[in-house]
Image (cartoon, rainbow, N blue to C red):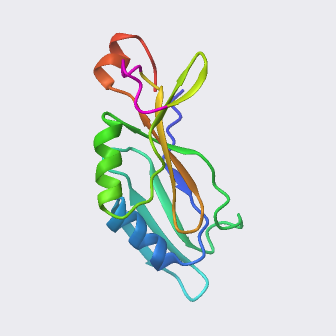
Amino acid sequence: MDLRLELVLLPVVDVDRAKAFYSEKLGFSVHVDHRAGDDFRVVQLDPPGSACSVSVGKGITDAAPGSVRGLHLVVDDIEAVHKELTSRGVTVAGIRHMTPGGWVDGVDPGHSPYNSFAEFADPDGNTWVLQEVRREQGEKDGAAG
C-alpha cells in the first residue's frame, strides 16, 4: 500500500500576503492560483525539491489562521539555508541541536541526521522547523525520513 502525502492546508488571513511570503521569501513555486467566486480561492505552492505541496486560500479550511505548528522542511545544509532565508528577510531562530544534556546552540558538530534545527513562522503564525539531514549520511546510517 502506498500512501503519499501531497498537500498540506495552511490557514491564513491574507492570501496574497501568504502567497508572496511563500513564493518570494521562501522560494516556493506557485503551482495553482484558482478562484471560484468571491468565497473560494486556492493557491498551491511547492517547496523546492519537495513532493508535497502546501495550499493557502479562502474557503479551503475552517482551521484558525496561524494554527498549524511544526511543519518540517528537511535540508541538506541547515547553515546555508538559514543564511539564505535570513538574507531574504525571513526571521529564523538560531540553529540548535540536541545533546544528552539538552538543547545547545549551533549545528550538531557531527551533523548527525535529524539533530540540527531552526524555526520560523509565516506572517500568520503557522510555524515551520528546518531540520538537517545530510542524505548521504542518513542513507548510510539507515535513517529514514
Q: Is residue 107 magenta?
A: yes
Q: Residue at (42%, 68%) from the top-left corner?
A: 21
Please say whether residue 22 is visible from this viewpoint: yes
> In which quadrant of the rendered view does residue 131 lie?
top left
Which of the 4 quarters of the picture holds residue 75? Answer: top left
Magenta span: predominant SS is: loop
| 63 relative to 145, above or below | below
**Residue 102's x, y, as percent?**
61, 24
- Vertical relation: 9 (above or below) 100: below
The residue that appears at 28% across and 20% down in the rendered structure is 136
The residue range painted magenta reads 105-112
**Residue lying furthest bottom:** 38
Q: Is residue 30 visible?
A: no
Placement of the N terminus among the 4 image quadrants: top right
State the image coordinates of residue 83 (x, y, percent, origin top left).
30, 49
Query: Is residue 38 or residue 78 the one in the foreground?
Result: 78
